């Protein structure tokens, strides 16, 4: 305060006619003490009163509220010696909070026992509050940490390069964990994988986004209403609330998993209940003004870093490359800073409260890898920072009122490659419309693919109508029906005709748009198509007229030549879904380079088949049974041809549920108010009530620090 009063013209800590140095110091001490007291007592109440304020707006209000507290604190100084302008008060309060946060972090860094003592004090207070004797109570708990989008191979390379020290120490010689490779479903994306992992079923989830003819709506997995509907369907199908039904917490996920404690859970974003409001995690974290200031500063730094990285990519003319302007720098900063900090704080609070099961998702790497590439310097730096988060969570388990198993996993990987539009000059929608003979943008018409599609459509339609073929513009009246709905999920495309009830067959499509399927199947950027058939059932179409019934598909042969093992079974399963699209389109895949073509603006993509996107990891303690002990039906536990020990996210759910049973017995949903004896205390109703913002506010700090070296990043990129 003294330093700021000396440099800011409208900040005064003296009487108008001046004061002695001692008097000024006492005035500063009075003001600082009053500000600290108000921050500790009034700030949490103010934040709690703002529960209806949109969470993103809270980050801006933090500074103004903090400045208001400083104005109030200075008003309490006797004789009117404290005075500051409103605008300056915001700056002074922010700087003071930042200095307090930096000082506590520096002191903890200088004394390795300081941070553990802090955790121990919080844990002790919670145990005393719950009437426990301070010792461990109950069976072990489990913390599941999902590193979104981190493929198995990327993890292995990062470990070999020394980029992930906290994870590596658990896998090295004498380590406590094992690393298992598992293969995703055809829809290799978070919506399908996490829904199955948390709720046991991803039936009828053909992609990240798809059109449903019976309801006339488009389902998008990361929209709150869609996520809530998907969760409802999964619960109805399985008859079970989810993996976290018994004393669980869900943090940063698309779905709740049946947990009663939520933070940043999309399927519950519209909830207004006091105890399970998804936004509660924000307020638990931001109730500490030091947290708010630290996160805001990190947010600004991350925005600047993204602008610098994208500018460097343009100047170096790096390829493949996608646009990274608009709101993306803010979206990236939210995923890599705000979401990370809030989730880390919430998970640590859950651990010190003794919850039975916690599932947290960190989306930072996945978000950055989409735009920078899965092995880019940018993405690997973010992955290294997540390693520090894992280390902080692991340290918190040491001071919890019960022992914990730490399980790390991913929901999918990412495959790299130039976008479909970047490679061929038109989008999948443009190609579909051209194949249907519908109008397309001029830029698409001028491309070779667009011109060939229009030419094929013109000749096919005239031949079908028994008209002579003339050069010129296609008569739009020759094409009946409305335009198709074309959606993209990474390198998986979905084409639906909304005016035709039910799933269209190949014969129906050929009658209506004679050139469409041929145009798509023969395009060099497309690997294969899945369509229904009237005579032979569903078929998979490939280049050069290749056509194989789904029931006869064989991995690596016919239209699946070059695609990885497991593709045939994944296609057969998706073909059985009620809401599969009229035409399912998978992009090409180069087995030599691992390249795919995303149908959206992503150079690191996932959602279909091909490359590392289908290969995720599961890292589990040796104390728990081996994951492959529960094998897919008919495989008897053997390792698949691609090295996968587990196939499908539903299989992963069964493994995780088995581990929870091993720790604490069967996970049986209980009626409200019923608490079994074995979970009374930190894992029962009392522990559930104790969880809240206090631990989140007190624990945030050195959880997400550290920066990987440039050499380590270069090593991984070379690998």
Image: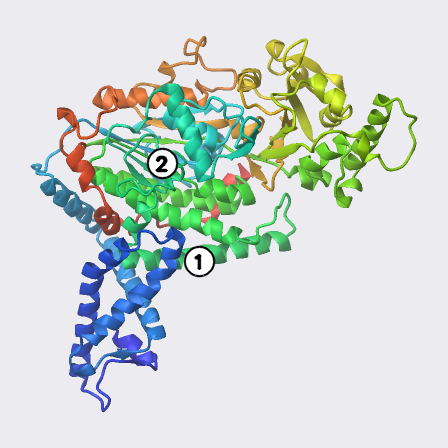
Q: In the displayed structure, does residue 142 sit left or right of residue 540? A: left
Nearer to me, 334 or 262? 262
- Asked if residue 67 can be seen in this view, the reply is yes
Q: Are marks 2 and 1 in contact (CB under 8 Å)?
A: no
Where, quadrant-wise, is the N terminus in this rendering? bottom left
**Snapshot quadrant of residue 196:** top left
Q: Position of residue 375 (x, y in %)?
A: 53, 40
**Residue 483 falls left or right of residue 183:** right
Compute the Cα span from label 2 to label 1: 26 Å
Please tell me which residue is depicted at 36% across the width and 14% down the height of the picture: 629
Secondary structure at badge 1 equals helix
Can you name the residue that lies furthest to the bottom here? 17
Q: Is residue 561 visible?
A: no
Q: Nearer the viewer, mark 2 or mark 1?
A: 1
**Residue 81 found in image quarter:** bottom left
- Of callouts 2 and 1, the N-terminal one: 2
Circle 1 Cα neighbour tier, 10 Å, few/some/many (<14 / 14–19 / ≥20)? some
The part of the image, by quadrant, that contains residue 651 is top left
Answer left or right for 67 relative to 188. left
Residue at point 39% right, 46% down? Answer: 339
Note whether 631 is above or below 509 in the view shown. above
Q: Where does residue 427 sit, x and y in percent of width and height?
A: 68, 38
Above or below, 10 relative to 105: below
Q: Is residue 603 left or right of residue 364?
A: right
- What label does residue 301 carry, if any? 1
Secondary structure beneath dot 2 equals helix
Locate residue 586, reporting x and y percent: 62, 27
* Depicted 134 relative to depicted 627: above or below: below
Residue 697 x %, y %: 25, 51
Residue for badge 2 = 167
Q: Number of marks in the image?
A: 2
């Amino acid at each position: 305060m003294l330093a700021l009063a000396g440099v800011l013209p409208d900040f005064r800590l003296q009487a108008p006619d001046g004061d002695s140095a001692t008097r000024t110091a006492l005035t500063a001490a009075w003001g600082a003490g009053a500000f600290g007291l108000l921050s500790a007592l009034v700030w949490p109440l103010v934040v709690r009163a703002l529960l209806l304020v949109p969470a993103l707006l809270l980050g801006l209000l933090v500074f103004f509220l903090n400045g208001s507290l400083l104005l109030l604190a200075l008003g309490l100084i006797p004789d009117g010696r404290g005075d500051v302008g409103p605008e300056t008060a915001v700056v002074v309060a922010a700087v003071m909070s930042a200095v307090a946060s930096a000082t506590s972090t520096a002191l903890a860094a200088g004394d390795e026992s300081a941070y553990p003592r802090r955790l121990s004090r919080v844990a002790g207070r919670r145990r005393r509050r719950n009437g426990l004797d301070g010792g461990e109570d109950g069976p072990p708990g489990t913390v599941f940490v999902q590193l979104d989008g981190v493929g198995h191979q990327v993890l292995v390379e990062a470990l070999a390069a020394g980029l992930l020290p906290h994870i590596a120490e658990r896998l090295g010689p004498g380590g406590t964990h094992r690393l298992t490779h598992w293969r995703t479903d055809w829809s290799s994306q978070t919506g399908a994988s996490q829904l199955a992992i948390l709720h046991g079923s991803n039936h009828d989830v053909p992609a990240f986004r798809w059109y449903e003819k019976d309801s006339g709506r488009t389902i998008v997995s990361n929209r709150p209403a869609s996520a809530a509907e998907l969760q409802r369907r999964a619960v109805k199908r399985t008859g079970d609330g989810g993996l976290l039904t018994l004393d669980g917490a869900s943090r940063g996920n698309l779905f709740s998993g049946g947990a009663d404690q939520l933070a940043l859970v999309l399927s519950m974003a519209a909830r207004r209940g006091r105890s399970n409001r998804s936004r509660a995690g924000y307020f638990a974290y931001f109730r500490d003004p030091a947290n708010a200031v630290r996160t805001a500063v990190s947010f600004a730094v991350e925005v600047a870093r993204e602008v610098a990285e994208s500018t460097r990519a343009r100047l170096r003319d790096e390829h493949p490359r996608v646009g990274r302007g608009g709101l993306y720098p803010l979206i990236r900063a939210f995923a890599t800073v705000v979401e990370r900090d809030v989730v880390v704080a919430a998970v640590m609070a859950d651990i010190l409260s003794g919850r039975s099961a916690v599932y947290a998702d960190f989306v930072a790497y996945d978000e950055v890898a989409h735009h920078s590439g899965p092995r880019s310097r940018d993405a690997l730096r973010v992955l290294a920072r997540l390693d520090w988060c894992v280390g902080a969570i692991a340290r918190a388990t040491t001071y919890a009122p019960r022992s914990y198993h730490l399980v790390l996993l991913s929901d999918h990987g990412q495959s790299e490659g130039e976008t479909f539009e970047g490679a061929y000059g038109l989008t999948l929608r443009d190609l579909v419309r051209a194949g249907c003979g519908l109008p397309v943008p001029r830029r698409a018409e001028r491309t070779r693919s667009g011109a060939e599609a229009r030419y094929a459509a013109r000749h096919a339609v005239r031949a079908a109508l028994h008209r002579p073929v003339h050069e010129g513009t296609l008569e739009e009246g020759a094409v009946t029906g409305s335009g198709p709905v074309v959606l993209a999920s990474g390198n998986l495309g979905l084409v639906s005709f909304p005016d035709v009830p039910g799933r269209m067959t190949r014969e129906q499509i050929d009658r209506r748009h004679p050139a469409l399927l041929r145009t798509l199947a023969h395009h060099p950027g497309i690997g294969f198509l899945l369509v229904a058939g009237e005579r032979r059932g569903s078929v998979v179409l490939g280049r050069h007229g290749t056509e194989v019934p789904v029931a006869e598909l064989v991995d690596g042969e016919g239209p699946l030549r070059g695609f990885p093992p497991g593709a045939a079974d994944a296609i057969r399963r998706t073909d059985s879904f009620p809401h599969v699209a009229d035409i399912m389109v998978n992009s090409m895949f180069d087995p030599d380079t691992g390249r795919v073509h995303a149908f959206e603006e992503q150079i690191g993509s996932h959602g279909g088949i091909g490359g590392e996107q289908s290969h995720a990891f599961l890292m589990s303690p040796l104390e728990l049974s081996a994951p492959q002990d529960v094998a897919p039906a008919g495989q008897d536990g053997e390792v698949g041809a691609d090295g996968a020990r587990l196939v499908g996210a539903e299989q992963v759910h069964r493994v995780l549920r088995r581990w929870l049973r091993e720790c604490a017995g069967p996970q049986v949903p209980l009626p409200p108010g019923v608490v079994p004896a074995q979970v009374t205390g930190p894992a029962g109703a009392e522990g559930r009530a104790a969880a809240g913002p206090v631990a989140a506010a007190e624990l945030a700090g050195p959880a997400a620090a550290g920066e990987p070296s440039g050499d380590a990043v270069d090593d991984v990129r070379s690998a």
